[in-house]
Amino acid sequence: MKKIDLSPWRIRHGSDCQLSDFNTRPEGVLSLSDDEVRHQTKKLSGRLNKLQIRLHAAKSHAVLLVLQGMDTSGKDGVISHVFSNFSPLGVRAVPFAAPTEAELRHDFLWRIHGKVPAFGELVIFNRSHYEDVLVTRVHQLIDKATCSKRYEHIAHFESLLHDSGTTVIKCYLHISRNEQKKRLQQRIDDPGKRWKLQSSDFSDRKLWPKFMSAYEDTISATSTKNAPWYVVPADSKPHRDLFIATLLVQTLESLNLRLPKPSFSLEDVKLT
């Protein structure tokens, strides 16, 4: 299977993120046919499962995958499709909604830190601490100075995670406004999907330019060498899933995970 180079979608530390520079549909090395996408994703799924078992057994590293994006961009879809063949051992998905009253009485990272992965775990954040510099900024719940300070706190927090053995991967699921319109209409038309709808889906849609600006500033300020952001083309669900499966495989392989040796001598074992 040909290796896919994802570096064109990685935001380099210190660079300016302009989302208009990125296509919401697959292009370049991602311009594969549907059959090729399905074939590659299936192969990657098997490889991912083996790597995750090694991660769980070795307990020498932890992996945190952060999924951010506008409503309907596919955060739930990534979790259900990319991780469909995973063993539940060592994998957790953590959704973040609006903070509770108790959480609001603490610093904004208080509710996050207790949910990060332990050694041997792969944890997926469905939304994350980034909501506190996105939604809060767009809805003017914090001022510009507070937002800038939070960027610094986030960078230090993720640096702490990295230094403690946690690999942080951050994906912005990049969909177009037209694609969101189609997906919202599908949810309206399908009674089995209406439960996903919230009033904020429609009110936030009206603020699309402000959210794009907030995402650009956030990604630019917090994409670092050890906790980079990737802008994932997400108008195509299969290509979106292939991108993230590829990214996870490449990340886990880079950790050089080793299965632990037995804690006792197998030579002394005699089966009767």
Image (spheres, grey):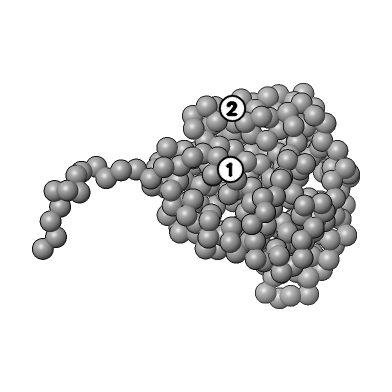
Front residue of 40 and 226: 40
In the figure, is residue 142 to the left or right of 272?
Answer: right
On the image, the x and y values in percent for residue 255 come to 51, 39
In the rendered view of the protein, which quadrant contains the C terminus? bottom left
Is residue 76 among the parts visible in the rendering?
no
Q: Is residue 198 above or below residue 20?
A: below
Q: Position of residue 33 (x, y in %)?
A: 77, 65
**Residue at 82% of width from left, 51% of height from top?**
28
Q: Where 15 falls versus 187 (above or below)? A: above
Whole-percent x and y of residue 77? 66, 61
> In percent of the image, x 13 and y 48: which residue is there?
268
Drawn side of residue 92 relative to residue 148, left or right: left
Instruction: Say few, some or many: other residues with alpha carbon within 10 Å of mark 1 (under 14 / 14 to 19 / 20 or more).
Output: some
Tell me the SS state at disc 2.
helix
Give the tally of numbered discs.
2
Q: Write down the residue under mark 2.
A: 159
Foreground of the two, 224 or 58: 58
Label 2: how many Cα within 10 Å (few below 14, some 14–19, many 20+): some
Q: Nearer the viewer, residue 250 or 199?
A: 250
Q: Look at mark 1 in the image and give the residue it sits on.
A: 251
Q: Amino acid at mark 2?
A: Ser
Residue 118 picture location, percent across and down: 45, 40
Q: Earlier in the sequence, mark 2 or mark 1?
A: 2
The span from disc 2 to disc 1 (Cα, nearest Å) is: 17 Å
139 versus 193 height, above or below: above
Judging from the image, what secondary structure is the residue with disc 1 in?
Answer: helix
Asked whether, in this view, residue 59 is left or right of residue 266, the answer is right
Q: Quadrant of the N terminus?
A: bottom right
Q: Nearer the viewer, mark 2 or mark 1?
A: 1
Residue 260, picture quadrant:
top left
* Contact between labelled residues 1 and 2, with CB atoms less than 8 Å apart: no
